[in-house]
Structures are given as C-alpha cells and as structure tokens.
Amino acid sequence: MEPLKNIYSDQFFKLMIKVVTAVEPSFKGKDFLASIHSTEWQQLELKQRIRHISTNLGKFLPGDYQSQVGTICAIINHLQKLPVKQNSFPWLFLPDFVEVYGLNDLKTSLNSMEVITSYISCEFAVRPFLLSDPGTVMKKMLKWSKHPDENVRRFSSEGCRPRLPWGKAIPAFKQDPSPILPL
C-alpha cells in the first residue's frame, strides 16, 4: 500500500494549479510547483507536506492575508461547483494556511474557517486560535453549532475537543470541559 503522503502527486498538483488559477489568474503555478518540489520533498511526511504546501502557497498568492484568504474561500467555492466531486482530504493545506498566517487576524480567520469547513474541516487549524483567544472562538463555535451546514456543525464540536489526534491539545478544556458542553 502506498503511503498517504503520496496523495500529493503530479496529478493532484496539476488539478490544484488549475483550480487556483481559475480563481486567481496571476497565480504562478510553475514557480509554485518548483518551490514545492524542493530537495527535501521526498523525505517529508504527510503533515510536513501539508505545512510545506501551505507556507509556499502564502508566498505565491498575491496580496495581504485578507486578500489571500479571500482567494482560498474562492477556491473552496470553485471546488464545490466542479461536476466531479473531489476527495477533499488533499486540500488540508487550505485550513493549514489559515493556521499559519491568520493568528493576527482572528475575525477574518474565523469567517474563512466557516467557508473552508464546508469542504474540508478546520478542526486542526482552529486549535491555535482556541489557545490564544478561547472566549471569542468559543462564542463563534456555539453559533456554528446551529449552522445549517452539517460540516460546520460538526466542526464546532470536533474543533474544540480537548484532545484531537494529530491536533494540538487544549489544556484548559482538559482541566475544565464546561465551555464545550453547550456544543
């Protein structure tokens, strides 16, 4: 069986560049791909590849963070309109982008997570935000628990679990889980 990290194949990157270019024509797909296939690419494991893709995407999407995250939301909308449904798992670098670049813009980041989660869950990406501003994030999580989209509702509870495989632990919620009980 092939390692899961190999979902990031030439075929996937061809699709990814096509999708990104459809919503952001100035995206330099060939340059982006060259930056991805650095000398260490083959040695990177799955989560390292996800982070490598998201950090390189930040170097190639034009504009500031708000503009870039607007492009990411447009990518999500484009993916949802494709006639053939895509496996969303390889797109985990999109929520990771928000985690990497968005901690200084909580409002924009939370709003983008709502859009992104309709396609691929932000349950890992939200955790640093929960650690830095649990009150604000939990208010939003409570609102999302009543969201019409089942993926957003699921994210509201999964994202704030005290322990999440592959995710950062939320020590405050391990000691006192009462903030997550209303969800």
Image: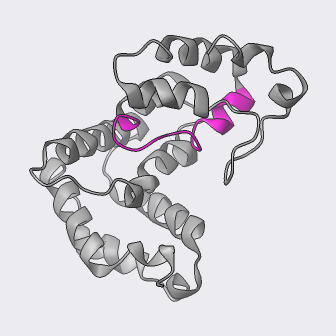
Task: Name the residue at the right extreme.
Answer: 175
In reply to whether residue 117 is colored magenta, the answer given is yes
Q: Position of residue 3 (x, y in %)?
A: 51, 80
Image quadrant in which you'd find residue 156: top right
Q: Is residue 88 left or right of residue 177?
A: left
Task: Name the residue at the front extreme.
Answer: 1
Q: Position of residue 5 (x, y in %)?
A: 49, 74
Q: Position of residue 125 (x, y in %)?
A: 57, 42
Q: What residue appears at the point 51 percent right and 50 percent down from the top-left corner?
A: 96
Quadrant where the C terminus lies?
Answer: top right
Q: Position of residue 94 (x, y in %)?
A: 41, 49
Q: Is residue 40 left or right of residue 119?
A: right
Image quadrant in which you'd find residue 66: top left
Q: Would residue 26 be visible to someone looking at this image?
A: no
Q: Which residues are magenta?
A: 116-132
Q: What residue appears at the point 54 percent right and 15 percent down from the top-left corner?
A: 140
Q: What residue appears at the point 35 percent right and 23 percent down from the top-left corner?
A: 149
